[in-house]
Image (cartoon, coloured by chain):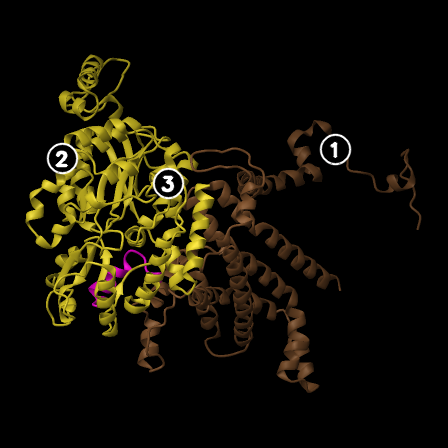
Amino acid sequence: MTVKPIAGSRGDAATAAFPRPRVSPARGLGGLLEDERPLAYLLLAPTALILTLFIAYPFLRGVWLSVTSATVGDPGLYVGLKNFERTWNDTIFHRVAINTFVYTGVTTVFKLAFGMWLALLLNREFRAKRFARAIILLPFIIPTVLSTLAWQWMFDPTFSVINWCLWQLGLITQRINWLGDEYLALVSIMIVNVWRGVPFYAISLLAGLQTVNPELQEAAAIDGATAWQRFWKITWPLLLPVTMVVVLFSVIQTFADFQLVYVLTRGGPANATHLFATYAYQIGVGTGLIGQGAAISLALFPVLLIVVIFQLWYIRRTETV
Amino acid sequence: MTIENREDGASNSRQVDRRTFIKTTAVAAGVAGGIEGILAARQAPAHAQGVTINMVRWADFVPASDKLLREEVLPKAEKALKATIKLETINANDIQSKITAAIEGGGGPDIIMTQHNWQHLYEKGVVEVGDVAEKIAKSQGGFYKQSRDVATSGGRFIAVPWSVVGLMIAYRKSWLAEEGAMKFPTNWEEYRALGKKLKAKGRPIGQTMGHTFGDAPAFSYPYLWSWGGAEVDAKGKVVLNSKETLESVKFMTAFWKDAHDEGGLAWDDSNNNRAFLSGSICATLNGASIYIESLRSPDKYKTDKGEQMKTDILHSPLPRGPKGQFAYHVPFSHMVMKYGKNQKLAKDLLLWLGTKENFEPWFLSQKGFSVGATTDWEKHSVWKEDPIMLPYKDAARLGRAPGFAGPPNAKAAEVQTKYIITDMYAKAIQGMAADESVKWAGSELKKIYG
């Protein structure tokens, strides 16, 4: 196909066939908005401003504080990596790092397992399905501090309702020291985290499950695939991208968990339940050693960066395969 | 009093013209300034007109005192100072966070209450208040040494001492008597032997070793001192890792297992109150809040024999150790914040609150839970009313401050805020070898003291 030049034009065939819209330079703001590039910058500006104010600035400020000797009311002096060196040699920090990794790792596995199980159950047809879907969100909806206070009562060293029930059932003869034993205290905060986190997994995975074409399941069932085979060979691979995103968000949130530990144990007994966030808070905000607190909180950053890069890379890879 | 500078020169009947205003404030300033000036002038000083002062204090363990402050004392202060005073009460464990946020944010409450020697951590964010503190001390027999020590840095008052919460062991008279103890044990060995018998009957001793502000350090510090242990020597050299400290940790580990409620590792400052009042423990180190609560609701708290719990409570100091008998009674002070725009008024309020006639209603509402920071309050007739409270009367005289044998400075405050001394015992109780826990605590102190 050839295109004839428009009569009277001086350009080549292509430009003559698709003439550019003429923009009058005198049209001011209206004209500016018709040009895609400035419009794009303009539309991005509010987001960029918010990100700069609430993400970039605090982050850079945190980085700066971590290399200073700042304490409350004193901006301090530049001290290089001294705070990081101190943190690295801090025995409490070692304990905190182990706690955080164990806490995040164990709770993520349980949240994923229970969340997937719940999502598969909720994906079935049954009476009061909508009500059940709404009710399982409760732990996620209730403000963390409130629900954790309720858990604090349940784990109370003297009046624990869990202990009372177990004792009534004849399963224990002595009180279980939920929050007073260094290992049980960590287990206790993990139980609460799993309880609170499962609904997020369940609802997100349920949304993913509903995008899986039921015909695939039906065809596999006709071919004689068992329920486990259908899950492992069909549901799981199709759900993997959603799962990775859910796990990504959950790991970031769990790694930086604060409220739950602060309310239940304040990091005790003897630092047995401190996580990065609570320890950074105790040092930076409680004790007022702001530079040191910033260095502790920045210890989170490389770990989370690696987790984010790996998971985003994995998601992109699965999308392109 | 309101002042307007209207262009037409008119003013309403209650308003003060410029000349009167200048005369009034000149009298106030000329006589002495501060509260004397206010009283002499019978008018609020110029700075107070229509100004709001925000004050943060802990949520008192004697709630009646907060109610009294809100409903009676502070409204009177508002009238006297012609200012609006807003009081916010928060959990004591959250006060330090509030202070840091306020100082770093450059705004917040004008006056913040502190406990222990915390003010040393915030020295650069507060104003010097010696003028107020010295006037209170001079008129009321002087501050207790502990109160003065924690509130001063290099001789400068960085906070105005307010009160001291005495810490004594509250115990069940009848339960101890059943074991043949007609009076409270005088030393740790006796206390352990008695506690062992009581724990065997399901009546253990209750003591927090958790991360909490009051009862934990008020036990762990004097316990350490009673064995001859100390954080530093008089020159500030760390001496915690010593034979005496090690002995104290070894004893504590066995003492805990033999005689204590093991849930105490997770307790905060209120758990022992609940445990005691429910009849779960035989004794606990505490302010007088347990007894005061049992007085407040006598029919709510009963003994196992159906008698009112208040009739079965007595108080005793901590037992004696190999190197003496010590106590740490928690001092409370108020800081005037440097970022505040009304520092003078904030100081005037603290001076107003600290005068005998204005402090007395609050002191009485405490029923002995707190004593004043000055020694004159020992002479008050209130101590004749209830012999059960008598051990608290002059308790503050026996108190030592954290950081002993050095000053209770910012380093001592850092050690205390990080719970290192308490955690030294908690770690050993949890199973760490005694020498390891002492070594750990010693190394943590060296990082702080250098």
State whether discs 2 and 1 lie on one chain. no
Callout 2: chain? B
Q: Amino acid at mark 2?
A: Lys
Q: Residue at x 64, y 31 (%)?
A: A29
State whether discs 3 and 2 lie on one chain. yes
Q: Which residues are magenta?
A: B265-281
Badge 2: few (under 14), some or many (20 or more) residues near its Cα, within 10 Å? some
Q: Is residue A77 above or below residue B205?
A: above
User: How many numbered marks does the figure carry?
Assistant: 3
The image quarter containing residue B16 is top left
Q: Position of residue B83 (x, y in %)?
A: 23, 30
Drawn colour of chain B? yellow
- Where is mark 2, residue-wise? B356
Badge 1: few (under 14), some or many (20 or more) residues near its Cα, within 10 Å? few
**Mark 3 or mark 2: whose residue is earlier in sequence:** 3
Give the structural element (helix, strand or loop) at label 1: loop
Whether pointer 3 and pointer 1 mark residues with C-beta atoms closer than 8 Å, the reply is: no
- Numbered circle sitting on residue B99: 3
- Where is mark 1, residue-wise? A23
